[in-house]
């Protein structure tokens, strides 16, 4: 059975017929990026396209909400991008609940995230709110050309608002350190940059960490 015939059948089950059915099926095919395979047999489609067909049949009747289980499981990066795009577009007019173990997916498409461990809700927040719980939130990753002198590292550690400085990596003539703030909500990057620049040390890059969902997930679910 071709994609369009399958969706015609699904629309009939939903109570559509005639011009209304053709209109709804056509709009859904466009919305789910299925125009190029509308006359192809469903059983010959790739997993990504089959996933889109499942989306299509589930939204034919324009439901107020959708519940999805691992919607991008097994898809390649391009297919994941397209499915996530569909979810974001549909979320404008629908409530969408889905389960996933892919944390970057939470960042990409979710406005709210719930973490469940041992059958209990252990966190309920926005992705941004969860990232703020990360031990890395607000820390500054500084890479310089040439080694940081021990006295300068110590001086950075004494800056107002800085809690500690830890070496991360040395690669050739570059050294990278992570600088942790006393308060993640109070920026320290400007003070760090000024301190290093005054000593004539070349700065290769500065990155302010927003927090990592995988770090937060492990902490919340294991207590470590």
Image (cartoon, rainbow, N blue to C red):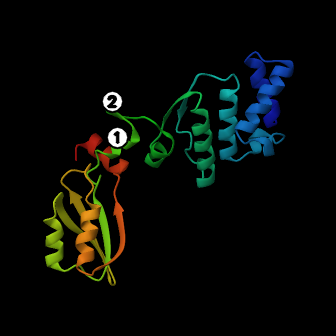
Say which of marks 2 and 1 sits in front.
1
- Residue lying at 75% horizontally and 24% vertically, measured from the top left: 10
Residue 21, image x, y percentages: 81, 22
Task: Kindly indicate the quadrant of the structure image that contains residue 35.
Answer: top right
Residue 97, image x, y percentages: 50, 30
Residue 165, image x, y percentages: 19, 66
Which residue reaches farthest right? 18
* Towards the viewer: 38 or 178: 178
* Towards the viewer: 186 or 93: 186
Packing grade of label 1 (10 A; few <14, some 14-19, many >=20) is: some
For residue 120, side relative to residue 109 (left or right): left
**Contact (Cβ within 8 Å) of mark 2 with mark 1:** no
For residue 136, side relative to residue 24 (left or right): left
Badge 1 marks a residue whose secondary structure is helix
* Towards the viewer: 221 or 169: 169
Task: Kindly indicate the quadrant of the structure image that contains residue 38.
Answer: top right
**Which residue matches tag 1?**
129
**Which residue matches tag 2?**
121
For residue 166, side relative to residue 97 (left or right): left
Give the quarter of the figure containing the N terminus. Answer: top right
- Residue lying at 24% horizontally and 64% vertically, measured from the top left: 191
Task: Kindly indicate the quadrant of the structure image that contains residue 179.
Answer: bottom left
């Amino acid at each position: 059975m071709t994609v369009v015939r399958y969706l015609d059948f699904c629309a009939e089950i939903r109570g559509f017929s005639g011009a209304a059915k053709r209109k709804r099926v056509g709009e859904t095919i466009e919305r789910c990026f299925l125009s190029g395979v509308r006359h192809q047999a469903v059983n010959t489609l790739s997993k990504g396209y089959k996933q889109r067909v499942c989306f299509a049949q589930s939204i034919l009747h324009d439901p107020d909400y959708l519940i999805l289980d691992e919607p991008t499981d097994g898809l390649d990066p391009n297919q994941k991008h397209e499915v996530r795009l569909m979810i974001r577009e549909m979320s404008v007019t629908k409530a969408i609940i889905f389960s996933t173990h892919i944390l970057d997916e939470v960042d990409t498409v979710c406005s709210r995230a719930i973490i469940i461990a041992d059958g209990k809700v252990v966190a309920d927040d926005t992705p941004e709110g969860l990232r703020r719980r990360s031990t890395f939130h607000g820390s500054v990753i500084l890479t310089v050309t040439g080694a940081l002198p021990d006295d300068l590292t110590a001086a950075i550690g004494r800056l107002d608002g800085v809690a500690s400085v830890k070496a991360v990596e040395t690669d050739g003539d570059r050294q990278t350190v992570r600088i942790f703030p006393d308060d993640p909500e109070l920026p320290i990057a400007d003070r760090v940059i000024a301190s290093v620049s005054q000593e004539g040390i070349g700065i290769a890059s500065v990155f302010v960490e927003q927090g990592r969902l995988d770090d937060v997930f492990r902490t919340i679910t294991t207590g470590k």
